[in-house]
Amino acid sequence: MEVLEEEELREMKEQQDHYKRMVAAEVTDISRMENNEAKKLADFEKMKANALEKKKQKNLAHKKVVAR
């Protein structure tokens, strides 16, 4: 009887360890995906700001030419 209980306890511990590893891997994947998404968003915002600045400079140059 005790042998069965020990075996069951060992199996339960293995299942718990497996579950903990799966959860840790999932948390790591989610963190990686969030970091990638944040980087993409930052890159997009930087490109957007650069495009707006370029447009502003182009308009300013055009106004200077027209003013002459």
Image: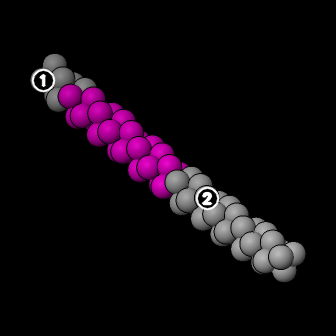
- How far apart are the two marked residues, 2 and 1, measured between alpha carbons? 64 Å
- Disc 1 marks which amino acid? Val
**Depth check: 54 or 14 in front?**
14
Q: Which residues are magenta?
A: 32-59
Pointers 2 and 1 in contact (CB under 8 A)?
no
- Of marks 2 and 1, the one in the foreground: 2
**Residue underneath mark 2:** 23
Does residue 32 show up?
A: no
Magenta-drawn stretch, dominant element (helix, strand or loop)? helix
- State left or right for residue 10 relative to residue 36: right
Residue shown at the point (18%, 23%) measured from the top left: 63
Look at the image and name its color scheme: one colour
Location of the C terminus (image quadrant): top left
In the rendered image, the vertical position of residue 28 relative to residue 34, given as above or below: below
**Depth check: 33 or 17 in front?**
17
Give residue 24's position: percent from left, percent from top. 65, 60
User: Mark 2 Cα within 10 Å, few/some/many (few <14, many 20+)?
Assistant: few
Residue shown at the point (67%, 69%) measured from the top left: 15
Residue shown at the point (83%, 76%) measured from the top left: 1
**Residue underneath mark 1:** 66
